């Protein structure tokens, strides 16, 4: 059992190799083989360009393996995923290959098992377990702030829905649940609510009407 090892938080170096599931980053003459989601492959620069890859080191009795991401948010979500019973590092990579952290957070918050089940090797039962085990670890207000920051390309600041203050998380949640009941996926519902600009004292029925206009 390997009890002592060096934690590699990120690797900064030259991108030397890209395959369907792995990359090699050269740092001072050492080539790090890193397993990455396909979503990372799609965003990588050309070989020979400097990159920074945020990493998680998986340690087993017989092996150590690096998993990498372009954003810290992805790496943090990966760490949450591997705490779920039945989902290992490869399963977590598969989920993040088809769902962004924002989409995954919204699917968890809205009990959208169908969306999570789109990931390779993740059936409805496992997706349901994922929702159950992670729902208390995902905050609705933070999910909206992170998505707003990602869409704006900046750090989370004022609430996207108001531009001034924060719309009640309960109002947002009620609106999302209403949209899901109408047949929209959790991800679609949360994105629709996130796009609406309203005042702080908006009611869930008013927010629902505005969100529906944007769908």
Image (cartoon, rainbow, N blue to C red):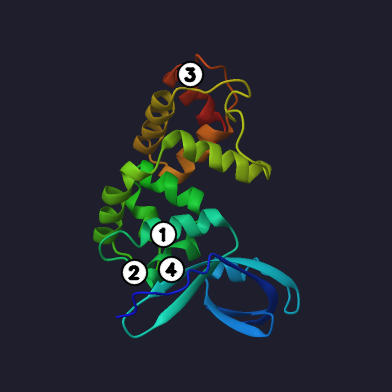
Disc 3 from disc 2: Cα separation: 42 Å
Reading the image, the residue beneath label 4 is 94
Dot 2 falls on a residue whose secondary structure is loop
* Marks 3 and 2, the one that precedes in the sequence: 2
Of the two numbered discs 1 and 4 in the rendering, the one whose residue sits closer to the viewer: 1
Q: Nearer the viewer, mark 4 or mark 3?
A: 4
Q: Residue at x 40, y 73 (%)?
A: 58
What numbered label is drawn on residue 196?
A: none
- Residue of label 1: 79
Task: Find numbered disc 4 in the image and state the secondary structure of the residue it sits on.
Answer: helix
Q: Nearer the viewer, residue 108 or 139?
A: 139
Identify which residue, 180 or 201, lies in the foreground.
Answer: 201
| Residue 114 image point, x, y percent | 35, 54
Q: Quadrant of the C terminus?
A: top right
Q: Which mark is residue 88?
A: 2
The picture places residue 86, in percent across and down from the top left corner, at 26, 66
Secondary structure of residue under mark 1:
helix
Residue on which disc 3 sits: 206
Q: Nearer the viewer, mark 2 or mark 1?
A: 1
């Amino acid at each position: 059992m390997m009890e002592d090892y060096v934690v590699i938080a990120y690797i900064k170096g030259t991108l030397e190799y890209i395959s369907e599931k792995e990359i090699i980053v050269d740092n001072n003459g050492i080539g790090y083989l890193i397993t990455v989601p396909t979503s990372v492959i799609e965003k990588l620069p050309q070989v020979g360009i400097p990159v920074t890859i945020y990493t998680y080191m998986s340690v087993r009795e017989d092996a150590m393996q690096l998993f990498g991401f372009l954003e810290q948010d992805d790496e943090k979500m990966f760490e949450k995923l591997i705490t779920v019973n039945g989902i290992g590092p490869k399963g977590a990579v598969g989920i993040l290959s088809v769902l962004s952290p924002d989409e995954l957070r919204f699917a968890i918050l809205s009990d959208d098992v169908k969306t999570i089940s789109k990931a390779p090797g993740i059936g409805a039962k496992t997706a349901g377990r994922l929702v159950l085990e992670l729902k208390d670890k995902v905050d609705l207000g933070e999910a909206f702030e992170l998505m707003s920051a990602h869409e704006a390309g900046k750090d989370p600041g004022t609430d996207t829905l108001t531009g001034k203050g924060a719309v009640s998380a309960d109002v947002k949640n009620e609106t999302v649940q209403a949209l899901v009941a109408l047949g929209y996926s959790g991800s679609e519902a949360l994105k629709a609510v996130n796009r609406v600009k309203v005042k702080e004292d908006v009611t869930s029925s008013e927010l629902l009407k505005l969100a529906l206009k944007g769908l």
